[in-house]
Image (cartoon, grey):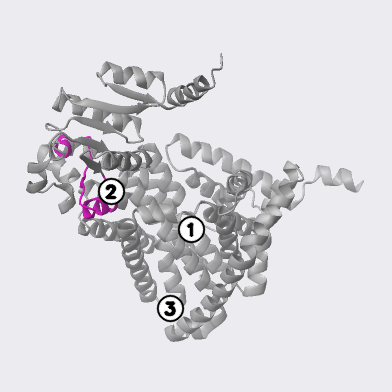
Amino acid sequence: MVISMALIEPTPLITTIVLGISTAFVCGMVASKLRLSPIVGYLLAGICIGPYTPGFIANSKIAAQFAELGIVLLMFGVGLHFSLKDLMAVKKIAIPGAIVQMSTATGLGTLLAYYWGWPFSSSLLFGLALSVASTVVLLRALEERNIINTINGHIAIGWLIVEDIAIVLAIVLIPALATGGTQASSDPQALFILLGIALGKIGLFIAIMLIIGKRFLPWILVTVANTKSRELFTLSVFVVAVGIAFGAAHLFSISFALGAFFAGMIIKQSDFAHEVTEKALPFQDAFAVLFFVSVGMLFDPATLIEQPLQVALTLLIIMVGKSIAALAIILLFRYPAKTAFTVSASLAQIGEFSFILGTLGLNYGLLSHEANNLILAAALISITLNPILFKLLDKFYAYASKHPRYSRWMEEDTSTLSHLSDHEKSEMNDFVIIVGYGRVGQYLRIKMKNAGLDFVVVDQNQETVEPIRQSGEHAIVGDARHRGTLEEALIGKARAIVVAVPDIYEAQRIVKIAREMNPNISILTRARNDKEFDFYKEQNVEHVVIGVKEIAARMMEQLQKYKIT
C-alpha cells in the first residue's frame, strides 16, 4: 500500500528533479533557437518554477541542496581543466590584464554597494561577483567565431584562468567574512586578519593534498580501475569530488567548492585524468543544469521593475567598466585593436562563478536576497546581450576591412616586435618563412637552425616571438592573413614559406595570399584529409603533408627493412 501510494504521489525530491530538468530542457532549447546561451534558458526555467511566479512552485530547500552539489561538481571540473601551461603562454598580458580588470570591476561594485549603505563585507563580495566572466558563455562565443586557437582566443582563455584563481581566493574569503560577523563587516582591518587565518588553513589543506592526496588519490583510482568495473570507477570519481569537498569543509572550515577544486587539480596530474574527466562530465552537466535552475528560483523578476536604476548601474559596471579596463590594458601592452575589442567584448558578461559567489554569500549570510537579485538580473541581461555585442563587432570589423586606414589600425601590432630591423632586412637572403609557432613550428625552427638554414618566424603572440628575437633569430608578431605582415616578413625575397597554423581556414587564406604575392615561392603546408589536399594542389602548393599518409609511409619504410612481403 505504501509502495503504491509512493508511485501515485511522487516525493518532493522526484518532483523537483523531474520538473526542474524538464523545464530547463524546454527553456534551454528555446534559448538555443534564439541563439542565446542555454544558461539563459536554465535560469528562466528556475524563474518559472520558483516562488516569485504563478503556477507550480518547486521545493526551494531541495533545489538549494542540488545547487550545493552543482557548485562542488562545477569547481571539480574547473580543477580538472585548470591549465598553467595555457596561462604561461600569454602570462605577460593575461595576468596583469585580468588583475587590473577584476580590480576595476570589484572596486566599482564595492563603492556602488557601499554608497547604497551595504556593509563593507557585502559590498566587497558584490563587487567580486561582478568581476568574473562566464567560462561557458565566453568559450561558446570563441567557438562560434572559430577563434579559440588564435591569439585572441588564447588571451581570453588565459584571462579566464587568472579569474579562476581569483575565484578560489574569493571562496577562501567568504567563510572568513562569515566567521568575523559584524566586526568584519564594519572593520576592514578585522576582515584582513580573518582572511590571513583562512589562508593559513587553506595552506595546511594544500600541503596535505600535495603530500598525501597526490599519492593517495591516484592509488585509489588505480585500485578501482584494476577491478575492471566501470560502475565502481564512475562512483569513485563522484566520491573523490564530493568526499574531499565535504572533508575540507568540516576539517579545515573551507568551502565545499574550494575542496572540490583542489581535488580536480590533484587528479589532473594523475595518469587517469582523461578517464576521470570523461566520467565526471555527465555528473557535472546534470548537476550544473540543476544549479542554474535553483539559482533562477532565487530570482525575483520584480527586481527589474522595482530597482531599474540599481540594475542599470550594476549592468554598466559589467558591460562598460570591465570592458574599458580590459580594452585599455591590452592596448597599453601594444596589442592590435582587434585583439583588444574581441577580448573586452568576451568579458562583458557574468555567469556561473558569479552565481557561485552569490549562492555562497546567501548561505553564509553575507549577501541579502536583494543583492543576489541584482547579480542575477545583471547576469541574465549581460548573457543575453553578449551575442548581440559580438554581432555588432563583426559588422564593425567588416566595415573596417573595406577601409585600409581602419583595417591597418585594427590589425597592426604597434610593438617593435612587429617589424624587422633595417639591418635584418639587408642581410636576409635565400631564407624560409615559418608561419605559426606551435609544436610543428617549434620543431621546424630547431631542425632548420641545426641545418644552418636562415628563417623568419611569423606568429601572433608577442610572448612567443620575444624570446626568439632575444636569441638573435628573425621573428615578427603579426597575422599572416594580411599582406602587410607577409611584406614585413620579406616574402618577395623568401625561397619558401611553411604554413604551420592549426586552423584550416586561416592556413588556406595564407596560402592564397602567399602565392599571389610571390608566384615563385615554394609553399609547404599540412592537410587533414584528401579534400584539403586537393584544395592545396589547386593552389599549386608544392608539398602537402597528410598525417596518416606520412605515418603509413614511415611504417612501410621500416617494414621494407625487414623484407616483409
Check disc 1 and report the residue beneath it. Answer: 353
The residue shown at (38%, 56%) is: 88
Check disc 3 and report the residue beneath it. Answer: 120
Q: Amino acid at mark 2?
A: Asn
Which residue is nearer to you in this view: 440 or 452? 452
Check disc 2 and report the residue beneath it. Answer: 461
What element does badge 2 sit on? loop
x, y (%) of residue 52? 56, 56
Q: Amino acid at mark 3?
A: Phe
Mark 2: give few (<14), some (14-19) or many (20+) Cα within 10 Å.
many
**Residue 483 falls inside the magenta stretch:** yes
The residue shown at (7%, 47%) is: 422
In terms of sequence position, does the residue under pointer 2 or pointer 3 come before the other?
3
Q: Amino acid at mark 1?
A: Phe
Position above or below: 135 against 140: below
Q: Please report the bounds of the magenta region as a residue range.
A: 460-486
